[in-house]
Amino acid sequence: MKVLSIDQSLNSTGYCIWDNGLLYDFGVIKPPKELEQHIKLFHTITELERIIKEENISTIVLEGLSFASSSISVRILGAVYFNILILAYRFDIVWEEVTPTSLKKFATGNGKAFKEDMWKVLPEKVQQKIEVEFKAKNSGKFDICDSFHLGKYYYEKIKGENYVG
């Protein structure tokens, strides 16, 4: 059973693919900056669809919307979020949502943690794997990090299994 955990956004969507509880693959979807928003959305959803098909994904785990954000960013993230749910519907994939505060509290003990805090608690061997390809701060490594924590949350909190790495 393969699980796709997604830290979705319009500019840098981090994802992890899990195979029976083990991290299998990860990456970032980064549409070109110069594209209009609706084209960036199309690019992101098309790439997620490719991953879903190629990897035979059975479950999607994604971060819920943060309504503490500005109304413009909530609308944009809402568009990405609901397009992912449409993909789940089209391919008959089970999906789970984790609230941003719950994810941060699970990973760091603090529901208001920052991206850097989430990175610090990432297992060192996972940090090393990610930084082989995604070293810079703006490379998407923090988005992959969040998607890792989403997958770990899924296995430990939703499925009740221990993450073993």
Image: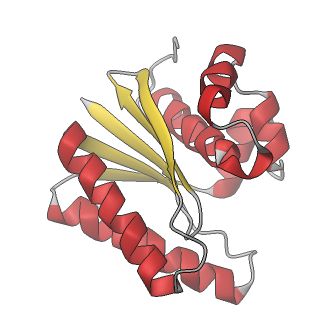
- Among all residues in the image, which is located at the extreme top? 164
Q: What colouring method underlies this structural image?
A: secondary structure
Residue 112 against residue 106 in the figure, above or below? below
Q: Foreground: 119 or 40?
A: 40
Image quarter of the N terminus: top left
- Left or right: residue 117 compared with residue 105: right
Q: Quadrant of residue 91?
A: bottom left
Question: Can the viewer see residue 110 in this picture?
Answer: no
- Left or right: residue 84 compared with residue 103: left
Q: Quadrant of residue 107?
A: top right
Residue 119, x across and y down, in percent: 76, 35
Residue pictured at 60% horizontal, 73% vertical: 33
- Left or right: residue 55 compared with residue 98: left
Residue 104, x across and y down, in percent: 72, 45
Residue 113, x across and y down, in percent: 83, 48
Total numbered circles:
0
Residue pictured at 81% horizontal, 30% vertical: 120
Residue 13, x across and y down, in percent: 53, 57
Residue 1 against residue 4 in the figure, above or below? above
Question: Can the viewer see residue 29 in this picture?
Answer: yes
Residue pictured at 47% horizontal, 36% vertical: 26
Q: Quadrant of residue 158?
A: top left
Residue pictured at 39% horizontal, 69% vertical: 43
Q: Foreground: 84 or 10?
A: 10
